[in-house]
Amino acid sequence: MKASLGAIETFGLVDGPGIRCVFFLNGCMLRCKYCHNPEMWKKGEDNLSVDEVVERALKCKPYFRDNGGVTFSGGEPLLHSKFIVECAKRLHEEGINVALDTAGVGLDDYDEILPYIDLVILDIKHTDKDAYKELTGLDIDKAERFIDALRKHDNKLWIRQVVVPGIMDNHEYLDSLVNYLNKFKISNIEKIDFLPFHRMGREKYITMNVPYPYEDKQDMDKDECDKLYKEFIEKYNNIYKDSNLT
């Protein structure tokens, strides 16, 4: 069994806890307007085997220590769900933690893959169905089927929200996000990150001769993004009393 590999990062520090070996798998059904990896939209040739994943992970294992491991990212790794299940089985035999960095839009076989995933890192695109479709090109129902499956399982969960100027940088959106997270098991949410929008992927669109959707947008100011996060987390902790996020 093989999957389509776009890239490998052997010392990833942001794709889960600790030091991670990150496998970026090609293919994605979404066309997010702020995507900075458009070269990974198409699935491409299957060029990565389960044995190769395990071999690379074992070489990195001395650096994982207590909390590192392997992360499958993308593109959208859920398009390679059967491959990831086989990898996760082998990695768990070696005592290696497995994380999934996803937008939750895959092949609807989520009950098959989630039991083998230690941590889910989930991108929230938007909380409103019309705005979600405008942003991604697909219906929000597809992502919410993944959320429904998450409620059945006890995966640890990190939430990520890209903050785009003029779209998410307002009090109304923060309120909607707080309410939207009620769809999850709050006790499983370990971390919530706000990521400021940036235009770093723009040159890739130009190279691919694809119009850059957010030509009129400027990078999100990081300090302003941090202020929004503080406002959000205060609202979140006030509503979800058992939360201790900071």
Image (tube, rainbow, N blue to C red):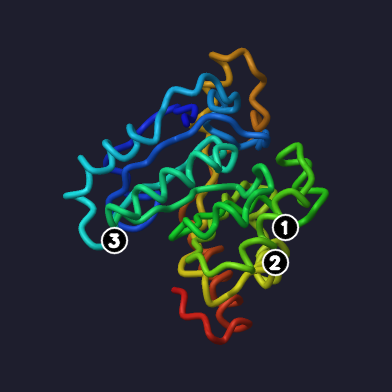
Q: Residue at x 37, y 41 (%)?
A: 22
Q: Closer to the camera, 30 or 241?
A: 30
Residue 133 pos. (x, y %): 78, 43
Q: Is residue 72 left or right of residue 9?
A: right
- Kindly indicate whether the residue at mark 2 contacts the one at mark 1 (C-beta within 8 angstroms): yes
Please say whether residue 22 is visible from this viewpoint. Answer: yes
Of helix, strand and loop, which one carries label 3?
Answer: loop
Residue 168, relative to residue 239: is it above or below?
A: above
What residue is at 44 percent from the left and 22 percent from the top?
Answer: 47
The residue at which mark 3 appears reads as 67
Q: Quadrant of the C terminus?
A: bottom left
Q: Nearer the viewer, mark 3 or mark 2?
A: 3
Answer with left or right where residue 208 lies relative to residue 213. Answer: left
Identify the residue at horizontal 39%, vertical 36% (top origin).
50
| Residue labelled with disc 2 | 180
Which of the two discs, 3 and 1, sits closer to the camera? Answer: 3
Residue 158: percent from left, percent from top: 49, 61
Residue 37's disc number: none
The three-letter code of the residue at mark 3 reads Asn
**Residue 127 has which mark?**
1
Q: Is residue 207 left or right of residue 93?
A: right
